[in-house]
Image: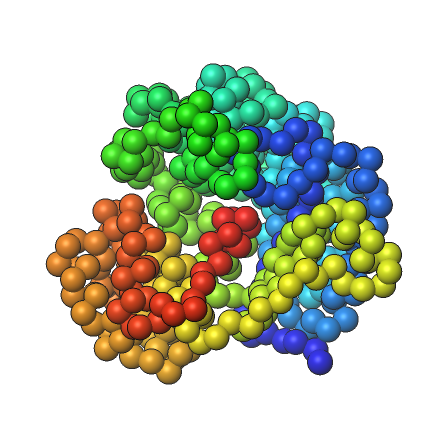
Amino acid sequence: MTLMNTEPSGIYIHIPFCIRKCPYCDFYSITDLSLRQVFLESLLREMETVSANINFHFDSLYVGGGTPSVLDAEEIERIINAAYKHFRMLPGAEISAEVNPGTVTSQKLKDYRSSGINRLNIGVQSFQDENLHFLGRIHSAQEACLAVRGAQEAGFENIGLDFIYGIPGQSEKSWLSDLQKAAELSPAHLSCYTLTYEQGTPMEANLRKGQIQAIPEDAAAGLFEATGVFLAHHGYERYEISNFARSASQRSRHNQKYWSDIPYLGFGPSAHSFLPPERYWNLRSVKAYIGAMNSGRLPVAERETLTQEQQITEAIFLGLRKSEGIDIDAFDKKFDKDFKALFGEVIQNLEAGGLIKIQKNHCALSHKGMLLLDSIVSMFVLSASLSQGLKTSGELISSEV
């Protein structure tokens, strides 16, 4: 059976290699770069094999990881060419790649631009060496600045910078100095994520042992508020809880698909795919992934078909992440439900508490409500008696965005 879609989908490529693992990161990667070439051949075969049953059209390709910038421009270009060869890529597609400042030079960035990449996400994380050392990053603050300026000189106009805040002991003044430096560089897009302690990571182990102390919740909330105020003042509009852009056209086209229930394909170890109502994900091992492709079978680890209740839960969780919120008309049409009738009491209570707002037939979180996303989603789920046996794909969302 060939699957088709009505609106553009996205393709995600997971590059599972890092020079060194960051202690806070739970995305799948390995440091053995000797497997790079055989992995790349397996990846290209996976793309070709999957394409036989897909008739979607695509307007975004996102090369993430891991550290995609361990690959050279020729290898990236092979991936891009394979996408255009095997899938219906639309003219003007957004072709994004993540870059670690410690793995690029000015020439490499120019080569990336020539390879077909038109959007860069640069993993700055901080412009302060002390913070970078704590986060286990391989680059310095100076290298981060050089990477941004090198990308601009290479001709990239759509540049996004990623930051982490809420580092133990971090003050508002310290965090705003990072944002000030970012604003001076004038990128198109900023992603600002609170430091989280993911289970199984070295940093989470250090937290449990008492070797580090997480920033207090009220301090983290203060940094969140300060972020929105500062960036709004400098011309960046929040369009998702952690994401800001100078204009609607400079938002991450690819990542918006994750929050909008749009199908996407994932390739590479641990990558997820979503073909509603089915989700599936690949083996979380480079060697097992290569082995599966060498034996002529797709490297799928598991599949799940979402029930309507699960789809409703995810529509609430993902919709409320967006500043525009949940499109009530679209929700009613998709699920054959009356959103306002289904959630009337919880909407009334949350509106009274200043946590949500209903405007232009959209249900959106206030800035205050964004701090309480998980709790508010739970209130929606419980109010509709949907809590039994449900699960949201929080791991999926955090692993691809």
> Seen from this angle, which residue lies furthest left?
352
Q: Image point 76% across, 34% down: which residue?
A: 32
> Seen from this angle, which residue lies furthest front?
209
> Seen from this angle, which residue lies furthest right?
295
Q: Position of residue 331 (x, y in %)?
A: 37, 73
Q: Position of residue 255 (x, y in %)?
A: 51, 53
Whether 229 is drawn above or below 364: the answer is above
Is residue 190 visible in the rendered image? The answer is no
Which one is in front, 359 or 65?
65
Q: Position of residue 83 (x, y in %)?
A: 73, 57
Q: Is residue 277 left or right of residue 112?
A: left
On the image, which quarter does residue 155 sit in? top right
Q: Image point 16% across, 65% down: which residue?
A: 348
Q: Is residue 254 left or right of residue 14?
A: left
Whether 275 is drawn above or below 209: the answer is below
> Seen from this angle, which residue lies furthest bottom?
336
On the image, which quarter does residue 392 sit in? bottom left
Q: Image point 40% across, 44% down: which residue?
A: 242
